[in-house]
Image (tube, rainbow, N blue to C red):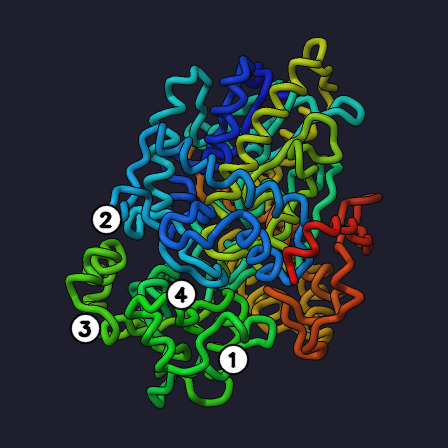
Amino acid sequence: MTESYETIQYDVLVIGAGGAGLRAATEAAAQGARTGLVSKSLLGKAHTVMAEGGLAAAMGNVDSRDNWKVHFRDTMRGGKMVNNWKMAHIHAMEAPDRVKELEEWGAVFDRTADGRILQRPFGGHQYPRLVHVGDRTGLEMIRTLQNHSIHQGFGIHTECVITHLLKDGDRLAGAFGYWRTSGKFVLFQAKAVVLATGGVGRVFNFTSNSWECTGDGHALAMRAGAEIIDMEFIQFHPTGMVWPPSVRGVLVTEGVRGEGGVLLNSQGERFMFRYIPEMFAADVASTPEEASRWLAGDSTARRPPELLTRDVVARAIRSEVDQGRGSPHGGAFLNIASQRTPDYIRRKLPSMYHQFMKLANLDITKEPMEVHPTCHYIMGGMRVDAETAHSRVPGLFGAGEVTGGMHGANRLGGNSLSDLLVFGRRAGLHAAQFAAGQNGFAAIDPKQIETAQQESLIPFHQAAQGEKTENPYQLLADLRTMMEARAGIWRTQEGLEKGLQELNTLKERASHLSVAGGRAYNPAWNYAVDLHNMLLVAEAIMVSALHREESRGGHTRVDFPTSSSDLEKVTTVVNLKDGGLAWKKEARPTMPDELKELLK
């Protein structure tokens, strides 16, 4: 029997209130669409606020040689050439305009001596390119977008969990979920839906991601019939804190290395000089002396190897640990105190300084940090059209980390914030245009709503009937431990196959999840709902990783340690078919010759 529920109607519904969601909703409303924004948490608490180093845009304010062509080349090379080239092209072209727009809306960026927006160096970027506000850039972005968006007149719904996307035939018809505060159900009818739900990091044991990042959008997209791509490519940020325990997993912004921080092993060696890939050899300093000249501002010196792409640095740290040269707690030392004065560090990296002093009694102006790679970002996600951000499900759009293709096998630092601005705007624009072309709302079969309610409430019924039950907290811990071991930074065929077997056991256990108590503010129930999505996302990651028999970017197969020229031309695609996960390979579209020339 169907329980009563609230109904709310919008032309465009945006799910997710981080940078991508806010930018999409702002654009949709500006186009005249009646727009609603749904947030799983409170407004202003999205994972975007945790972005520290900056947003990448080729403005050329610090080095006039920078332009969109160099940014495009860096993005493609950083992504190991498997990016959606059209998305990378659009991103590099439009990012500067999105920065200027943000400034017009009130963003206060750090400035050069002559008053222009300051830009800092970052891993994988040829020139200083990251627009920043100290090391609080994501927070400033969210503050600016929120302050601007509240005047656009769209509806905002916080602490709402979306559990199902509803369809009328092939066309998307709306979304169904519940309020965390009361447990009561709500139906959002919409002519178009934009997914902007972020990443999947909570599937892993060690992650920089906030609690909301449970792969909701990836799973919702698959269940709605969308394809997702490149799920094997997981970025492990090289510098997550490993010690002391009070800050374990806390991210150390790449800005620390951008401002001169160096990586050292237990023997005091600056080991990154041993791990410079041939692809980047012409761009990276080959000696500590040249790196010192770069630090001193010598424009003829090449950037230090600590600013190689994240996948390279993460693997280098792991290799040092595996060879017995790791720090006492299984990581490496990141030292900026030896390179910069205390005043410089406190001025350029205020959040890093204050948070580690308060949380760990660690003074980064005097002591090194002990770091280890931590799950940070997924390059894979829902397949969307580069121009319109439209998926292959009519009426379903996407922007930000929930989508795939833009970053290829490895995302460059700072590209995520400019990505969500560029494609958040495009998703909102084209969702509004799609909605304007529809004659009324699509019909929703009441059976879909009844099924959605029943599936959401299963854990309560199992507790009442006294069946064999599973604790959602324990199951979540077991899933994350398994993913870290089987699909973490090193992968093998044997490990992935065992992981899929173990995942089947976890899925069987998940059918017996049980929660007690009421529905209002019930964390056990929320975890049970999240697990429904996380198990599907975990399977997509491992299936994709098993079939890509090479190492590339954020995907490292120990049994296939090199990259394959044939697989450079391949996209990994997964979708739900006949109740199971289907996998296939597809040829990537050919890049135009004029763009190929930029990569030489």
Q: Residue 48: give its label.
A: none
Residue at figure coordinates x 64%, y 47% from the top left: 404
Identify which residue is drawn at 46% across, 40% down: 96
Q: Is residue 484 above or below residue 466?
A: below
Residue furthest toward the top?
439
Residue type, label 4: Gly
Q: Earlier in the sequence, mark 2 or mark 1?
A: 2
Q: Amino acid at mark 1?
A: Tyr
Quarter of the image for the N terminus: give it. top right
Find the distance from the CA under tag 2 to the CA under tag 1. 36 Å
First in sequence: mark 3 or mark 2?
2
How far across and down, in percent of the image, does residue 488 sit? 58, 68
Q: Which mark is residue 275?
A: 1
Element at label 1: loop
Query: Quick one: label 2 or label 4, which is nearer the N terminus?
Result: 2
Graded by Cα atoms within 10 Å as few (under 14), some (14 to 19) or many (20 or more), the crowding at tag 2 reads: few
Among numbered discs 1 and 4, the one appearing first in the sequence: 4
**Distance between the alpha carbons at the discs numbered 4 and 3:** 19 Å
Q: Which kind of residue does numbered mark 2 sit on?
A: Ala
Q: Secondary structure at mark 2?
A: loop
Q: Are marks 1 and 4 in contact (CB under 8 Å)?
A: no
Q: Which residue is mark 4?
A: 240
The tag earlier along the polypeptide, 1 or 3, is 1
Q: Disc 1 to disc 3, how far (Cα)?
A: 27 Å
Q: Check disc 4 and report its element: helix, strand or loop.
A: strand
> Which residue occupies 51% across, 24% down?
27
Mark yes or no: residue 254 visible: yes
Question: Which label lies toward us, 2 or 4?
Answer: 2
- Name the mark on residue 366: 3
SS label for mark 3: loop
Q: Is residue 508 visible?
A: no
